[in-house]
Image (spheres, helix red, strand yellow):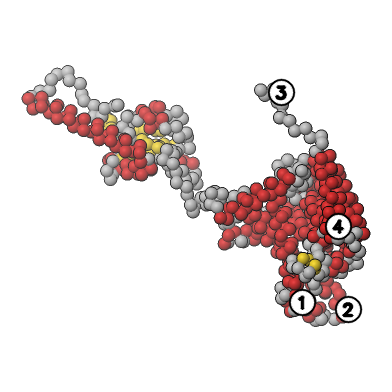
Amino acid sequence: MLGGGIIKGLIETARNFLGSYHDPARFVTVQYPEQSRVHPENNRNFPFLVFDGDDPAKGLRCVACKICEKECPPQCIYIVPERDERGRPRKHPAIFDIDVSVCMSCQICVEVCPFDAIKMDQVFELSGPDRFGRLLLHKQDLAKPNDYYRAIHPSEAVAVDAQLAAERALLEAKAKTNVAPKAGGMPPAGTPAQPKYSIT
Amino acid sequence: MLLETWLVQLKHWMVNLFPAGWQPGVGSLVSVTVILGVFATLFAVATLLERKGLGRIQNRPGPNRVGPWGLFQPVADGIKMLTKEDIVPLTADQVVHFLAPIVLLAPVTLAFAVIPFGRKLVPIDLDAGLLFFFAVGSAAEVAAFMAGWSSHNKYSLLGAMRAIAQMISFELPLVISTMAVIMMSGSLSLVEIVRAQDGGVFGLIPRWHVLTPWGLAGFLIFFTAALAESNRSPFDLPEGESEIIGGFMTEYSGFKYALFFMGEYFGMFAVSGLATTLFLGGWHAPLPFLDRTLVPSFVWFFGKLLLLLFVFIWLRGTLPRLRVDQLMNFSWKFLLPLALINLLVVALWRFTASWPLAGRWALCLVALAAPFVALGAALMRHRHWKPRHYRYAR
């Protein structure tokens, strides 16, 4: 009959109206600045650099190999390696900048990094008064401890830590085997230089 | 008794401070001030209630930033509206553009003059109060067209033309549904109409007009037409912010815009007050014996008014906007015939006064329900609801 749909609709809105007072499942609004939703673990936003130990300047895992800089599709990463007085790279970045206004959060830098040095962060409250001051993140802004990585991506971090520990153990074992011929005298000629880290 | 009459006594005391020649003028000035103050406050409260209510209907809290639970939101809105720049288009008809919001607000405010707010609170007891109400209420159409025409904007003009068509179409069922009440109470005076709803059956069931078959039908027709008259959703085509960007209010900004809103809300209060007076027993308590308690009668009146306002908000949160042709069909092919039939039902009710109550009710309900179903079916006859056929999007 004419008008039945109106009554049905009125009942539905009345249920919403009353339900919003006693049913938290209906009242879905989160009062954002005061409250915040818990992010899912795989939530990602912009990259950050992981460092081990306490000193962000020394403990950075990054060796300034520039793979991420080359792979970055929007070219938002800028790296200058630190060099010693003879101009040889020191396996440490002097400058590591990420322009987050350009970054498209694709995670390719994380995928290509052989040293697990760059990971995806979850911070999103990055608004600032000007573009270049706040949105161009420098090395000291990007460096965050491994504990932070463990906190935001727990299961991923456990896997990475286990893998790094395994690699370190392997290296130590290799170092021990390499020590034995060294003790005998000169190393055999033609032995290739051991890489410090292995790329798996 | 003091609770009931303190406002009237205060007015008498103030008027008696002045010489005899001034007293009528001062008296009406006091009444005007009180009406404006009360309804401006109610306007502020209603905007907050509307935003909160709509929010809750949509499962969100509504404004809650200004003050506790957002209670001071109307203050913030008012300050915002006052401090905004008042832009008048260069090609607009400056004088008419300026006058339109005033022409809208003034008659709507005049309409409050004849509504009995309480047992003693009647600003003016006109013999033809109802006639006066509709006479001043119809000036809103002029204001809407003034605003739309003077803005020199196609959207404004579209909105104004829609407003005129809609208001004239719905004025008829609105007036005819009130004629039923006039036929039963035999008076055009709103005070008399409230008096006709005095007392109760067994002292329990009030003798309100809405509790009779013709009154129920009349109330529903009146309320639907009142929705359209006050340009409220689902009949907010003249505004239609999603299709014609605010209609006749497009070129208004700052406090003139706020005045249009005030006019809309005042219109809503006025028709709600009239519906309360005509059908819901005016200032009478919902149970007749409560009339003799200490609760002043205007509390009941404003309680019913707020209830009707809530229904306005509830409907706005529920129904989508109608199309223009649907609106016109609904008014001319459904509401108007039903209102006319309701007049016959009133006559039936009046001349079967000696019948047993159940027989009267059954007869009148059948006399109303049959045309309701028939008209409803006729209204939907040419609607062939089929799955939509897209020719090129397979």
Q: Which residue is mark 1?
A: B5
Q: Residue at x 49, y 45 (%)?
A: A127
The chain letter under disc 4 is B
Asked whether disc 1 touches disc 2, contact meaning CB atoms under 8 Å apart, the reply is no
Q: Secondary structure at mark 4?
A: helix
Which one is in front in this view, the residue at disc 4 or the one at disc 2?
4
| Residue A62: % across, % down | 31, 35
Q: Is residue A8 left or right of residue A47?
A: right
Could you tell which of marks 3 and 1 lies nearer the N-terminus?
1
Q: Which residue is mark 2?
A: B21
| Residue A78: % across, % down | 39, 33
Q: How far, Cα to Cα, is label 4 from label 2?
A: 55 Å
Which one is in front in this view, the residue at disc 3 or the one at disc 2?
3
Frontmost residue, B338 versus B76: B338
| Residue B58: % across, % down | 62, 49
Q: How far, Cα to Cα, is label 3 from label 1?
A: 71 Å
Could you tell which of marks 3 and 2 lies nearer the N-terminus?
2
Q: How far, Cα to Cα, is label 4 from label 1?
A: 40 Å
Q: Secondary structure at mark 1?
A: helix
**Looking at the picture, which amino acid does disc 1 mark?**
Thr
Could you tell which of marks 4 and 2 lies nearer the N-terminus?
2
Q: How far, Cα to Cα, is label 3 from label 2?
A: 79 Å
Q: Secondary structure at mark 3?
A: loop
The chain letter under disc 1 is B
Residue A132 showing in the rendered view: yes
